[in-house]
Image (tube, helix red, strand yellow):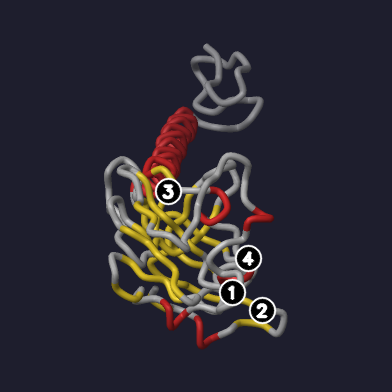
Amino acid sequence: MHCTNCGVEKSNQSKYCTNCGYSKEDQHAITKSSTKDKKRFRRCMYIILLSILVVLLFNIFFYRPYIGYGPSMLPTLVAGDIGIKKVTMFGLNDPTRGDLISFRFPTANGYMKRLIGMPGDTLLVVERQLYVNGELSDFESKLFFSECMAICPCTKMEGVDIDLTVPLVVPEGHFFVLGDNRNSSTDSRHFGFVPRNKVEGKLVFIVVSIGRDGVRWDRSWMRM
């Protein structure tokens, strides 16, 4: 007969193993404890894997993080803003005019701009003022202005024909976007209309904003 603890053969007459000193009851308790430890470990692994799966699904179908950089959305967004954007893919949470939307177009790099023109909208700039469907845009008060805000021919992408000095109709399945800081923004004036299927999400609030001097508390938990 072999000891279940150390594996050394022991006498059937002896209650204790002469090698490790454990009794049969001790060995049974050790085996039982080892089984419990394995079950506890498997349970912890299941919980960890399930948590990871939940986070991944939440990230894919509901919300994603946003980190602000660059001047194109000043003064609405500043470098160091950390926020949450609601997923608008898969036909969920369709964006509306005025939303701050993120998209990957015309390159794989992500952009965050304001949605100005919905499909079917007519856009026109008159004396540096943007009109949507014949009415002054509701978002003009948030914008920076410059003399060349309507057209920036020198920075247009090849093949893009956007001219806001004449009525411009947004085609179906597309959006027209602008940066709030219009004199320092690459947007639909340069790369054209954004396809709906390239839009990833819309910014819903800023969780915290961090600058060189520390946390900007006045921008924390700020709804967009």
Q: Is residue 82 left or right of residue 139?
A: right
The residue that mark 4 highlights is: 69
In which quadrant is the C terminus drawn? bottom left
In the image, what residue occupies the spot 28% across and 52% down?
120
Q: Secondary structure at mark 4?
A: loop
Percent across and percent down for residue 35 are 43, 32
User: How far, Cα to Cα, is label 2 from label 4?
Assistant: 11 Å
The residue that mark 2 highlights is: 211
Point out the tag, 4 or 3, that comes first from the N-terminus. Answer: 4
User: How far, Cα to Cα, is label 1 from label 2?
Assistant: 9 Å
Q: Is residue 123 left or right of residue 146?
A: left
In the image, what residue occupies the spot 48% across and 50% down?
103
User: Which numbered disc, 1 or 2, marks the residue closer to the eye?
Assistant: 1
Label 4: how many Cα within 10 Å (few below 14, some 14–19, many 20+): some
Q: How many marks?
A: 4
Q: Nearer the viewer, residue 168 or 89?
A: 168
Q: Which mark is residue 78?
A: 1
User: How far, Cα to Cα, is label 1 from label 3?
Assistant: 20 Å
Vertical arrangement, residue 128 with respect to residue 194, above or below: below
Point out the tag, 1 or 4, that comes first from the N-terminus. Answer: 4
The residue that mark 3 highlights is: 200
Residue contact between numbered discs 1 and 2, judged by CB atoms under 8 Å = yes
Residue contact between numbered discs 2 and 4, judged by CB atoms under 8 Å = no
Label 1: how many Cα within 10 Å (few below 14, some 14–19, many 20+): some
